[in-house]
Image (tube, coloured by chain):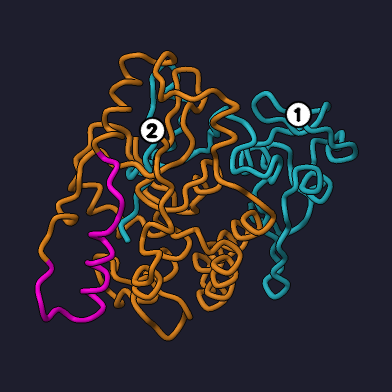
Amino acid sequence: MTVALDIDIDLARPWNTLAAATHPTLIDTTHITNAAFGFTNIPMAVWIDENGVLVRPAEAASIERSPLRDMEIPEGLPEQLSKVMHAVKAIPDDAEAYRAAILDWVRNGAESRFAMTPDEVIERSRPHSDDEARARACFELGEHLRRTGHADSAVAWWKEAHRLDPQNLVYKRQAWTLVTTPAGATEYDLMQGPNDVYDSNLVDEVSGEGGFAQFIVRPTL
Amino acid sequence: MILTELRTTADAFHSSTGWEPKPEGLCRGEICVPAPGALATDGSLDVTIAAERLGMPIVHDVEHGLWALGSATLGGRALSTAVAADPELKTFDNEPFRLSSLRGKKVILLAWSSY
């Protein structure tokens, strides 16, 4: 099953419709699953067994190598676009191994070497201090305020969420895209470049040495 | 969880946080954290006491008269239990959906976004 971490269902819906999935597809406009499962980026996944117990904590989840990894980056692109494309190409790829792990778990269940014990799941879940917990509250406040007509106040709380939990790329990209996406657009801006509202942006944060990898929780396989 | 006062119902707290207030404490999965004084006999919950026991920070927006409850920090990990949370979510058709409806099946819950 999938869950869209999207404040605005209308901008997520076209992608969901296009996917035409046969599994349950959900929308999480308040990002409650971020806190509940530890999602800090996308795509990330948790594995849950037949008894409702997690056997793998939140980690990067791809089952197919993205064609973007192998793309030729044309010369002469706008600088920001070129930076992001280079950063995308450098994203670590665990798709083949992750897909194999899923299939092994499907076949072997609790006997799969990829299924963790409850203690392992907890221990390998993301560190969560007062800062991260407070960031969650700030993000939720921001979402509530934006939804109830106080968008400017939302920004202030989202800035605080970013400061408290700089590793949470979902909190950042959700906030950034709301200011970099032109009014009336039918799709979110994916680049989330420099803007007048936030001091940080996606282009600058992934163009540096850490790239996208600094925000990725690679599956331990 | 967004609040307009620091007292709520036990049901609302459970629904929003996944922690169920019981006479023995605040419970989730196999864990119960004692919280004397949190749960009143009328079923209301003192959020300040509950939050302190679970390590949940409370953020106050003075201008708008709102409080927001952060997630629990027990154990210093995102997960304090391996029992999967079961928040009520919505489908794209606005129908309610709970993860527990898939009990009996292996589930991979994958998060994505349109941005």
Q: Chain of mark 2?
A: A
Quadrant hosting residue B43 = top right
Q: Can you tell which mark lies on residue A192?
A: none
Q: Which residues are magenta?
A: A73-95
Specify whether A186 is left or right of A209. left
Q: Residues within 10 Å of mark 2 (few under 14, many from 20)?
A: few
Colour in which the image shows chain B? cyan
Q: Is residue A75 magenta?
A: yes
Identity of the residue drawn at 42% across and 30% down: A47
Q: Can you tell which mark lies on residue A221?
A: 2
Give the amino acid type for the residue marked by disc 1 in the picture.
Cys
Quadrant hosting residue B17 = top right
Identity of the residue drawn at 44% across and 15% down: A110
Specify whether A113 is left or right of A187. right
**Distance from the alpha carbon under mark 1 to that under mark 2:** 32 Å
Quadrant hosting residue A120 = top right
Specify whether A159 is left or right of A42. right
Contact between marks 1 and 2 (CB within 8 A): the answer is no
Can you identify the residue that label 1 sits on? B32
Identity of the residue drawn at 9% across and 72% down: A74
Q: Position of residue A12 (x, y in %)?
A: 30, 55
In this rendering, the answer to whether A37 lies above or below B107 is below
